[in-house]
Image: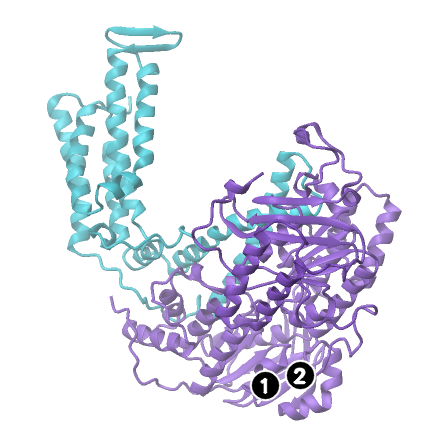
Chain colours: A purple, B cyan
Amino acid sequence: MPRRHDPATPAPPPPAGLRAAGWGWRHAGRSSWAVRGLDLVIEPGERVLLLGASGAGKSTLVQAFAGVLGGADEGEEEGTLEVAGLDPRHTRGRAGLVMQDPDSQIVLARVGDDVAFGCENLGVPRPEIWQRVGRALGDVGLDLSLDHPTSDLSGGQKQRVALAGVVAMQPGVLLLDEPTANLDPEGVVEVRDAVAAVVRESAATFVVIEHRVDIWLDVVDRVVVLVPGGGVLADGDPATVLGEQGDELARSGVWVPGRDPLGGRPARPTHAPRPHHGMAEPVAGADRRIRGTAERADARGDESGSSQSTRAVRAALGAETASPAADQRGGVLLTARGLDVARVEGTTVARGIGLELRAGQATAVTGPNGAGKTTLALTLAGLIPPAGGVLEASAELAAGIRPSGRRRRGASSPDTSPMAWRSRELLTRIGMVFQDPEHQFVTGSVRAELEISLKALKLSAEEIEERIAEVAGRLRLDGLLSANPYTLSGGEKRRLSVASALVARPRILVLDEPTFGQDSRTWAELVRLLAEQLARGTAVVAVTHDRAFVDALADQEIVVGAELPATTEPAGAVRP
Amino acid sequence: MTVLAPPRGTQRIHSINPVAKLAASLLLSAILLVTIDWVSAAVALALESVLFVWAGLGPRAFFRRTFAIWIAAPLAGLTTLLYGVTSGQVYWQFWLMEISDGSISLAVATVLRILAIGLPAVVLFATIDPTDLADGLAQVWHLPSRFVLGALAGMRLIGLFLQDWRQLELARRARGLGDSGRVRRFAGQAFALLVLSIRRGSKLATAMEARGFGGSTVRTWARPSPFGAREWLLVVAGAVIGAVAIAVAVATGSFNLIIG
């Protein structure tokens, strides 16, 4: 089979220009226009960063240029839109599009086949397809065999495969819609570098949507800012636009370099700016395996050259002997001792974790990818059983748990293991905000989403109304109560997922990567909201890669180590 | 996720066009289902075992893959032995169970037939790579590419279903919905999975369209799907094995038409 890398001289595709004239689009079933009255010309070969507040119709515009917005049954169109002077629906392949979600952009099972998919659809002859595939994979810096299964790739690698698939089509325009929004910081850099390399090599017109401006500043030569409802707010070279419109952009949620989304005010009034490291605080006198984890994490820190986590862990080891008096904010609610966590029974991902969650205290869980941070969060939230060690709720937190005959097993009542609690009992004690908001939606409207837990708690109708009004108002969801959760923007989905956990007023709130891909406005709102919750005495635990978030809120930082050495005993062996 | 990317082996059986495997297996099964007697099944099994050696799987891989068949066949045989149509001498009886000459021969025929149909099917199907099958269906049988590739891409989502299902389970417990009865919980969760799948499906469709899928251009195929002498040989072998088995059964007088 002709499957090999074969670098031949590329025939440079001619770049295509983009033009919108009085263009507008209204999605079927919506009363307001996503974009309206837009006049914009992008010359062939220009590199444009497209900015604008959430809901300014950036994605709609880019999808329209890519020709995937659909026909009259998908929505109503006005004005004209052109790619290289033609209707985008008839120029498929001229404009290549990479979107946010890495999982829904991979089409086929093997890397080579997936990259070839676009070329096949364009009718490229077979020998040329494999030449292009080899070149495209080289351009995005992926050194993988063509037979490599796509299901084994990291998020950043998946995005690069998607990018290679588009590059192989040799489009005249390269359109990227927040290609790094779902990636951790390493993945962001990986994808940015791949895109930068592609843009350097190719003459194609380049348009990227992104609210983290600093990522793309070196790659683009023009910034266009759209306003919600239609029209262009600002247009020009990056320095001028960011200089003149910086305040306005920052207000609308764009991460403008050098601007603090919190406006210089600390999120927590009583909270001194946290030193960069050294707040990790394992339980003093807890069992020996804490040291084990810390040592592994330490070794990993040295390997990867991440001095940050190394120092944090060293501080953690020091704290074992020091008195942990610093953060006695409130009573202990939940204690983990020698806790092992496993997503699937038998495959323990992190071991020997010791920590205490206190009322009004914020705990950040950090560490490299695949270290088991999410699994730890799910275990702390009482959603999956510990694989070993002890996870124990304090008498304060467990008060009111009804023991059931089935669960008693000779244990003292009330049961102090969150996993043994009923789902309803968990609601008011430990709330969980999942990494992907869509994974926690269980109803068809924002209101129902907020209501459902309160109904499970059997609250009165007035109380339910009151709580919904409060939380919806606080999180700017009051105008969206009848909307379908799946149709919300990324920021709105995140706010809803937090709101639906908060509405039950849990004593502990566990969040998994709450700030991933959020614009600066949503970010600041989240930080302030969590600070408020802390002040009210809620314990907050957040799994995060976001240093600014840790600095703004955390009282203690737990660094979870990398993969376990292969020689560790099976999880079952340490079960009490 | 093993649904979409089974290990690509180097053995001969892996290199045969999946469409030929499909055809051979269907042909053989259809012929062997005409009669229920032990002679035809035994002849077919004997001839097939030559092919199994030729497939190059090796005894370990062969028995690992066909494990389920080796369990299922004796179980089906046992049931037939105890409950099969009684005729000839009765050897043992208890309630509805009866072992007789008739049920013994029927049981032997059943075991052999399940092996004769099941073993080649598993060997042929377990070595089919879905991507190659899609290539074959579209290029050899000329099924519409939209349909074939849509189904292939959709299969990738099956691997995600399991993950989604677990995630939904956790979400429902976290949201206070985990206490309701098993049936209600299952129904609610199944509906949520449906919503999530449709959502994934439409995102995937957009991604495919963005790469020019479903356009008016005539598609090319990156991977050839050759259908040559070896493929014809396999299909003919399937037909010949079936024919010889039937012929021997008729000649020995044991042919026993299943209908009637």
Badge 1: few (under 14), some or many (20 or more) residues near its Cα, within 10 Å?
Answer: some
Foreground residue among A155 and A307: A307
Q: Which percent across, then down, holds residue A456?
A: 76, 42
Which residue type carries mark 1? Leu
Q: Can residue A386 be seen? A: no
- Front one among B110 and B8: B8
Left/right placement of residue A564 relative to residue B256 reads right
Q: Residue A470: give x, y in percent of width and height.
A: 85, 58
Q: Residue at x 30, y 45 (%)?
A: B125
- Mark 1, chain letter? A
Q: Considering only order in the chain, which callout, 2 or 1, is on the residue closer to the N terminus? A: 1
Asked whether the beta carbons under mark 1 and mark 2 sit within 8 Å of each other, the answer is yes
- Seen in the image, is A446 located left or right of residue A161? right
Horizontal and vertical percent for residue A47?
54, 87
Residue A125, percent from left and from top:
30, 73
Which residue is denoted by mark 2 in the rendering? A257
- Can residue A272 be spotted in the picture? yes
Q: Which label lies toward us, 1 or 2?
A: 2
What is the chain identity of the residue bearing mark 2?
A: A
Q: Quadrant of the C terminus of chain A?
A: top right
Residue A108 bears which disc, if any?
none
> Residue at 44% of width from left, 58% of height from top?
B153
Write the residue at 28% across / 46% down: B22
Q: For mark 1, what is the residue?
A: A217
- Secondary structure, mark 2, is loop
- C-alpha span from label 1 to label 2: 10 Å
Q: Secondary structure at mark 1?
A: loop
User: Identity of the amino acid at label 2?
Assistant: Pro
